[in-house]
Amino acid sequence: MRVLAAMSGGVDSAVAAARAVDAGHEVVGVHLALSATPGTLRTGSRGCCSKEDAGDARRAADVLGIPFYVWDFADRFKEDVIDDFVAAYAAGETPNPCLRCNEKIKFSALADRAVALGFDAVATGHYARLDDGVLRRAVDADKDQSYVLAVLTAQQLSRAMFPVGDTPKPRIREEAAERGLAVANKPDSHDICFIPSGDTRAFLGAKIGIRPGALVDGEGQVLGNHEGVHGFTIGQRKGLGLPGPAADGKPRYVTDIDPDSGTVRVGSAEDLEVWGVRADRAIWTSGETPNAPMECVVQVRAHGGLAPAVSEAVGAGLTVRLREPLTGVARGQAVVLYQPDAEGDKVIGSGTINGTTSEVPESVRGAGTGATR
């Protein structure tokens, strides 16, 4: 096959490209220029897609003996990822930009161009596995990225390759060193790639500006003021701008955000519990919408937030009834549905969270383990 290897400049994508070469594919490396001002943005392990990364990717391609190009996707990235990220926060949501980048850039814009140029697949360094078109968790649970890939359609998955998903990360670094790749010990990038400072609130403030609002408790009593709902997310405990804990001595958490009124509601840890999730933009990785409720395990954020549940397709969206409560469930995040099996957790589908319910299911109430709030 003709394979386009997306090379970020990190160790994972370099080894993924190397493995595609070893498999006998005709491989071409490409680095995506995602910034209109691609200065050296990296500070330690923060940021990515800088000139430094492009150089690292080129050197890796030279070692592998494959052609290498840099493609400019800066305008598309700004529109589909950065602008979407800012708009979501302004609307009181908590988006995942890596998820949108996979959906809109790497496996849409990039894959479309690759197919137009005669390539059969796009290979990336994501930690996930594909088994006859079925997306599964990676072998390395700590590095698993199936959550941010669950927005891919069956067609997009049919053109994807994840060559490192069957290997633990330490072994990937060892393999890179054995191959003579200089990125073998390069630090992993963290945080949001287009916010190398790591200060998301400052970044959003510069984009959105000041939009004053009130911090209120569960009774609606005003506790303080803030400069914009974009500075908050569901489950947040620190940086609330309040003088101390609640009257009972317990810490306060953000429990709800109303972007229209600018109101940010805070409450106790118990107030964060949800028993149901609603989502739109449902994507079923098999390409077929389930016709009946199904038992599954759901994940509601990139790291953690797992619970057994029953999911059901509803129109273009889906609903989830949890078997046990989750906390910190934010609108704008994805809910990803997994089906545990002998081959590893299989991704069933995903949706973008647009609402939750704290009502305890009848089955739980009947067991005496909860009460309706």
Image: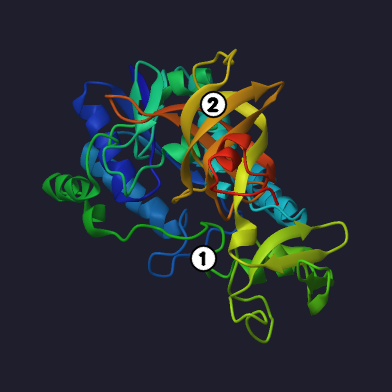
Q: Which residue is at a point 27% across and 43% down the rendered structure image?
A: 140
In the rendered image, the quadrant that contains the N terminus is: top left
Question: In front of the other: label 2 or label 1?
Answer: 1
Could you tell me residue 83's position as x and y percent? 70, 50
- Identified by mark 2, the residue type is Arg
Residue sitting farthest toward the left: 178
- The residue wearing badge 1 is 196
Could you tell me residue 355's position as x and y percent? 71, 43
Mark 1 crowd level (few <14, some 14–19, many ≥20, 10 Å Cα): many
Query: Going by the image, does 260 lie left or right of 168?
Result: right
Q: Is residue 27 above or below residue 167?
A: above
Determine the image quadrant of residue 297: top left
Between 88 and 92, the one lying in front of the other is: 92
Between 201 and 235, the one lying in front of the other is: 235
Determine the image quadrant of residue 354: top right
The kind of secondary structure element at disc 2 is helix
Q: Which residue is at a point 58% across and 55% down the rendered structure image?
A: 328
Residue sitting farthest toward the bottom: 243
The kind of secondary structure element at disc 1 is loop
Is label 2 in contact with label 1 (beta carbons under 8 Å)? no
Query: Going by the image, does 12 lie left or right of 45?
Result: left
Could you tell me residue 67's position as x and y percent? 33, 34
**Among numbered discs 2 and 1, the one appearing first in the sequence:** 2
Q: In this view, does 26 lie above or below 219?
A: above
Query: Going by the image, does 62 lie left or right of 250?
Result: left
Is any atom of residue 46 visible in this view?
Answer: yes
Q: Which residue is at a point 72% across and 69% down the rendered structure image?
A: 205
- Identified by mark 1, the residue type is Pro
Is any atom of residue 70 visible in this view?
Answer: no
Tell me how many marks there are. Answer: 2
- The residue wearing badge 2 is 113
Residue sitting farthest toward the right: 261
